[in-house]
Amino acid sequence: MRRRAALAALAAGAAVSASALAQAPIPTRTPLGVIPIAPGKSVDRVETNRVDFAPGQVMPRHKHTVPVICFISRGDFLVKIGDAPERRAAQGSTTYEPPETTVHYFRNASATDPAQLLCASLAGRDDKVLNVMLDPEPGS
């Protein structure tokens, strides 16, 4: 008898929880940006990476063979991509690294706090090597 009562109470609690979830509003979606991919390409997989930076740490000069979109999940970065001027990429923003474009650096803007990127590489069937480290810039 005790066991039946316990099961009935558990079932009633689950029904209340399911009912409360059904009535809860859906999570809020906040657009972060629309990033055109030019030239367009066929994508059959998205490879994702978390990139952790120590305070002040720099990802040196590199390029990608495919489009890469990064979400700044922690901290702020100073970024120089292609011919664009250096810019600050703040936590919660996104960056776009076009294929075959030199990324001169991604620098954690803080000398005291770690920072983090969540990156997605848009790869096609024939894309094998996605990241290429480059020699340092002359004079650096």
Image (cartoon, rainbow, N blue to C red):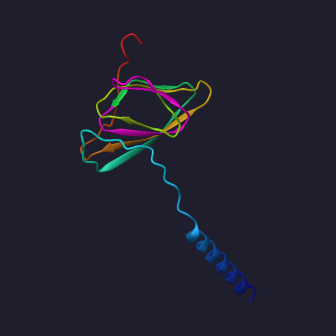
Question: Where residue 62 appears, x then y in whole percent?
Answer: 36, 27
- The foreground one among 65 and 97 is 97
Q: Tell whether position 86 is magenta.
A: yes
Above or below, 19 relative to 2: above
- Judged left or right of residue 29, residue 99 is left
* Numbered disc total: 0
- Judged left or right of residue 85, residue 13 is right
Quadrant in the rendering for residue 61: top left
Q: Which residues are magenta?
A: 64-87
Quadrant in the rendering for residue 74: top right
Question: Where residue 70 appears, x then y in whole percent?
Answer: 43, 39
Most extreme residue toward the top is 139
Above or below, 72 relative to 81: below
Q: Tell whether position 109 is magenta.
A: no
- Quarter of the image with the N terminus is bottom right
- Quarter of the image with the C terminus is top left
Above or below, 11 relative to 42: below
Question: Where residue 82 appears, x then y in whole percent?
Answer: 34, 25
Question: Where residue 13 appears, x then y in whole percent?
Answer: 67, 76
Above or below, 5 relative to 107: below
Most extreme residue toward the right is 2
